Amino acid sequence: LIGTVISVRDRVVTFKTSFAGTLSLSMDHIVSVNNRNPAVMLLADQTVVNSTSMIINQENLVLPDAAQTYPVEDLQVVNPEPWELGNGYRWTGSLSFALAMQRGNTDTDELNYRLDPVWRSKRDRYTLKMGGEKDETNGAESADNWHIIGKYDYFLTDPKYVGLLVSAETDKFQDLDMRYVVGPYFGSQFYNKPIFALSGELGFSYVTAKYNIAEEQRYGASTWNVHMTSNYLGGKSALYLDQRGIWNLKDTSDVILNTTLGLSFPLMWDLEAAAEMLFEFDSGAVEGVDDLDQTYKVRIGYTW
């Protein structure tokens, strides 16, 4: 195949051709790469190497102009982004909406919204998650909730990091006026391949929960966060699972779980669609309120 090597990352070569567009090829399927254009290479020990050409086979990385050879396992990234070289932050994220309108025997209006920006540098990461829902049925409000989560991560030795969580959420129809959570955690990227990526965080937080009817609660809690993704279905689609948990250490029978299962896939330009199932479980829900709330939705958003 003749074309241009755009990048090499996680043993996947991104290769631009004039006859088939841009291809993503696993190194396991490549005998060799002969690149005659200048390239910047980031090695596993964080050494940065500049070369006017390079040859990659399944065992070695050869730099003819420098007369150097490295094991191909030492090659982390070819043509890294500025943030990977310690220059500034990479900003990624998405903004999405889910809207449903029904007219007839029942008049229903539903609006879901979500904003998920992330700023990542070589040493740290800032994450912001915002979302909410407002529903109306036959002219009466039937859902009104929102949440905001802020996280700061400081990387120790890749893939381990420590962080600080601050969050606030409210749910009028679950009797929750406001719940605040703040505390530190330890996290790790256990596995990070396109076919399967898994990260998790475990920490301790202080929780303050104010209710409209029930009594206010203040307690220490064990908190966790699990994130899994997979491109098993191919293309740029992604299967994903997110779970946030709060375990009340004062009343160990009280557990809160927010779990999202979803499938996202690209549309045109930078638009993305996703089908999701949300399960919100609260074993300490007040009388008259179900402890499990289920939501099924399709959302469309912009990613960057």
Image (cartoon, rainbow, N blue to C red):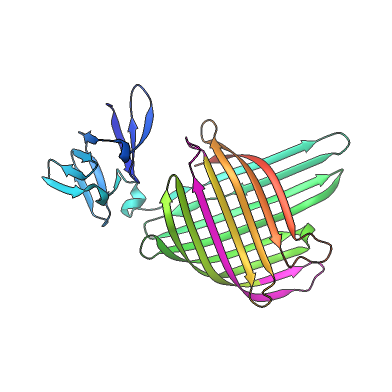
Which residue is nearer to you in this view: 105 or 194?
194
**Segment tinted magenta in the rendering:** 208-237
Q: Residue furthest left?
A: 67
* Location of residue 106 with respect to 163 vertically, above or below: above
Q: Residue furthest bottom?
A: 250
* Location of residue 62 with respect to 36 vertically, above or below: below
Q: Position of residue 74 (x, y in %)?
A: 25, 51
Instruction: Choose top left, top right, bottom left or bottom right for residue 217.
Output: bottom right
From the viewer's perspective, is 19 left or right of 268?
left
Which residue is nearer to you in this view: 123 or 197?
197
Residue 54 falls within the magenta-colored stretch: no
Instruction: Choose top left, top right, bottom left or bottom right for residue 79.
Output: top left
Q: Please state the total of marks drawn on the protein image.
A: 0
Which residue is nearer to you in this view: 73 or 209?
73
Q: What residue is at 50 percent from the left and 68 percent from the top?
A: 185
The kind of secondary structure the magenta stretch mainly shows is strand
Q: Quadrant of the N terminus?
A: top left
* Location of residue 204 with respect to 97 vertically, above or below: below
Q: Position of residue 24 (x, y in %)?
A: 37, 35
Q: Position of residue 8 (x, y in %)?
A: 31, 42
Q: What residue is at 49 percent from the left and 45 percent from the top?
A: 230
Q: Position of residue 245 (x, y in %)?
A: 61, 63
Residue 213 falls within the magenta-colored stretch: yes
Q: What residue is at 73 percent from the left and 57 percent from the top?
A: 292
